[in-house]
Image (tube, rainbow, N blue to C red):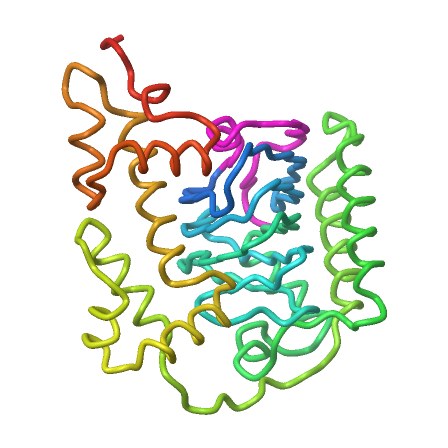
Amino acid sequence: MCQILFPVGLVISEQHLSFDEMKAYEVGWDMQSLQVQSGPFYSKIQGVHTPNMQLGIHTYSKGMMFRGTYPKGCILLYGFTSEVLPTSHNDIVVENEILVGFPGHEVDIIINSPCVAYTLVVEEKSFNKAFYNYFSTSFTEYMSAHKLLVEYSRGEALLELFKTQLEALSKLESDAMTAEDYEKLETAYLNILFSYLQNQEKEVQRMKFDISKVRRYFDENIGDYISITDVSKALNISERQLYNAFKKTYGITPKKYLLTRRFNAIYQELKYATAIDTTISDIVAKYGFTHMSHFTKEFKRLFHKIPSELLAQEVV
C-alpha cells in the first residue's frame, strides 16, 4: 500500500442536509451538483475512510446532475438505485452496471429522479494490485473490453454488503489498527466486491447521432436566447429527432435541461453576489429571462425559495 490518502477513521453521518450544506461533506471532491427536479431538497450522507479507501452512501430527494472530479490518484466505482436509469457521459447506464472513473477523469451524471448513490474510491496502485491478484489481468486491459457488471441475482445483496461494510468500518477503533491491518481489510473488501462481478464483453455500438453535441451546444450558449429550432439547424438534426433522442438519453426534455442549467447558474451567482454590487434583475438578464414575475415563480418552484433570499444584503 502507498502513503495514507484519506483521513483514517473519519466517519460522516449527516441527515437532512440542505443543497448548500451537502457541499461541505464532499471530502476530496470537486463536484458541480445541480438540482433537476422542483421542490424542497434534502440529502443524507454516510461515509467512512481507511488509509486508501473512501466508502460513501449519498441519498438525494430530487433528481440531480453531477459533473466534476473525485480524489486525485484514485479509481472510482459508483452506482445508483433510482426510479429512472441515470445517464453517464451521455450514455444510459445499464441497470446492473458499476460505473468506473479512472484517475484524471471526471464524473458526468444526469438522473431525473430521487436516488441513492453508492461510491467507492480506492487509491490507484492499491486497487490495481488487488484486481490483478484476483483476475490475473490488469484493470485497464479488462475495462478496454468489458463493462463492470454485477450479476443480476446478486445486485441487492451487494448493496446490503456495501451498507454492512460501511457500518462495520465506522465502528473500528482506528487507533488500534496498524497499516498492515488496514491493508488486509481493504484487500478482503475488494476481493468480496470482485466476486460479485459477471464477465461480459462490451457490445459494439451502432453509429447514431451524437446527442452530446446538443448538450454541449446548450452549455456553451447558456447565456444566450436559443430555441430548439436554432439548435436543430446548427447541428443539422430535425427538431423531432433532437427532442426524442435527448429525452430518451437524459430522461428530461431539451428545454428543461437548458432551463435547469440556467436556474442553477443564477442560484450560484445570487449566492455569492451582494446587493451592493449587483441586482437580481442584472443576474437574471444575463441568462435570457425578461419576465421577472414568471422567473421568480419558476425559481421558487425549483429551489423552494425566492431569489432575494439568496442575494446578500450587505458585505460581511
Asked if residue 21 lies in the magenta stretch, the reply is: yes
The C terminus: image quadrant = top left
Q: Residue at x 58, y 64 (%)?
A: 99
Q: Is residue 199 left or right of residue 71?
A: right
Q: Residue at x 67, y 30 (%)?
A: 9
Badge count: 0
* Picture layout, residue 189 above or below residue 98: above
Taking the image as shown, residue 267 lies to the left or right of residue 144, namely left
The span shown in magenta is 1-27
| In the image: residue 244, left or right of residue 170 | left
Q: Residue at x 50, y 72 (%)?
A: 248
Image position, residue 312 (x, y; %): 29, 15
Question: Which of 279/92 is in front?
Answer: 279
On screen, residue 117 above or below 87: above
Where is residue 10? Give x, y as percent: 64, 29
Tell me, yes or no, whether the highlighted magenta stretch contains residue 301: no
- Residue closer to the observer: 108 or 42: 42
Q: Residue at x 68, y 83 (%)?
A: 200
Query: Relative to the observer, which residue lies in front, 57 or 127?
Result: 57
Task: Tell me which corner region of the image, top left, top right, bottom left or bottom right, holds residue 190.
Answer: bottom right
Q: Quadrant of residue 15?
A: top right
Along the line of sight, which residue is nearer the eye, 195 or 134? 195
Using the image, determine if residue 289 lies above or below residue 188.
above
Q: Give coordinates of residue 268: x percent, y percent.
A: 32, 33
Indicate whether 262 appears above or below 22: below
**Residue 95 coordinates in the image, percent (x, y):** 68, 69
Q: Is residue 72 left or right of residue 4?
A: left
